[in-house]
Amino acid sequence: MYFALKSLLQEAQNNLKIFKNGELIYGCKDARSPAVDWRELAHHLKPFFYPSNGLASGPHCARAVIRELVRVITRVLLSGSDKGRASALKLGPGSPGPCVCEASPFSRSLRHQGKSSLEHSGLPKGCLLYQTLQVQMLDLLDIEGLYPLYRRVERYLEEFPEQRKALQIDGPYDEAFYQKLLDLSTEDDGTVAFALTKVQQYRVAMTAKDCSIMIALSPCLQDASSDQRPVVPASRSRFAFSVSVLDLDLKPYESIPHQYRLDGKIVSYYSKAVRAKDAAPVSARLKESEDCTLVLHKV
């Protein structure tokens, strides 16, 4: 999580914004280098995340402030909460640990730390990230497996258009709708009901994959009450915090064909890139050295 958040800070684009007293102080400045942005961000946040090592200025201070910011955000995202209903979705035992692409900078980060594999302890079940992940994992088939089921529902609606309301394609998204999401079976019985359940689960999962998380931090004195809000400790202070999830309008039913075409384009472009790379001519230097022998001498 430290690595992911630092990477997000380096390439914020439109995926991360930081406000101070309602004023945007970080994000959406693609033309500037991350180093310049980090120094400016550290200048804004230094009164709240003053580094515990006592550095008051310079690149080391900026890195210390950013490191403290990332640590606080991570603690907030992992903090428990008994609110929300997503934890009711039981998807079986967790995986032994995520695979890491060898080409990823994260692999180099692991090697730099002297680790050969990623430690995996799982997310705390009460935290927002765990709850969000459970909803994202409702997408059991991906778009390739889902699209034929979507076409099954479409054919049914073409024949019985009056059933669209009864199938809750456009809502209401109430308790009855939620209960249908709990059916995690993957055995296709050929019915419209099965296809519709998978389509609705996909819509909910895609909504969770595209949601926004807003974290509000407010400094509080060591002995002051936080108005019943949870508190996260920092190196030299404490912050009362609140976490909200935004952009939860359900993905439209009609967007599924677009997602299917987009996925096809991504696969097509990737295949073309791989073929072009494989077809690239080998340099003359390599051709001339095909039969060379490498001799290692003792030093």
Image (cartoon, rainbow, N blue to C red):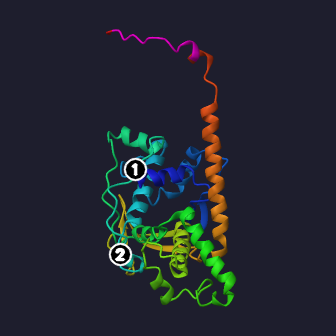
The boundaries of the magenta stretch are 287-297
Q: Name the residue nearer the viewer: 210 or 291.
A: 291
Q: Is residue 2 visible?
A: yes
Identify whether 190 is placed above or below 117.
Answer: below
Q: Mark 2 belongs to which amino acid?
A: Ala
Residue at left 34%, top 59%?
A: 95
Q: Secondary structure at mark 2?
A: loop
Q: Which numbered circle lies on residue 168?
A: none
Residue at left 67%, top 74%?
A: 254
Distance, label 1 to label 2, CA atoms, is 44 Å
Image quarter of the N terminus: bottom left
Residue 60 point in image, percent of width and height:
44, 43
Q: Residues within 10 Å of mark 2 (few under 14, many from 20)?
A: few
According to the image, label 2 marks what residue?
A: 224
Q: Is residue 293 magenta?
A: yes
Q: Is residue 216 visible?
A: no
Instruction: Characterize the magenta stretch by its predominant secondary structure.
Output: loop
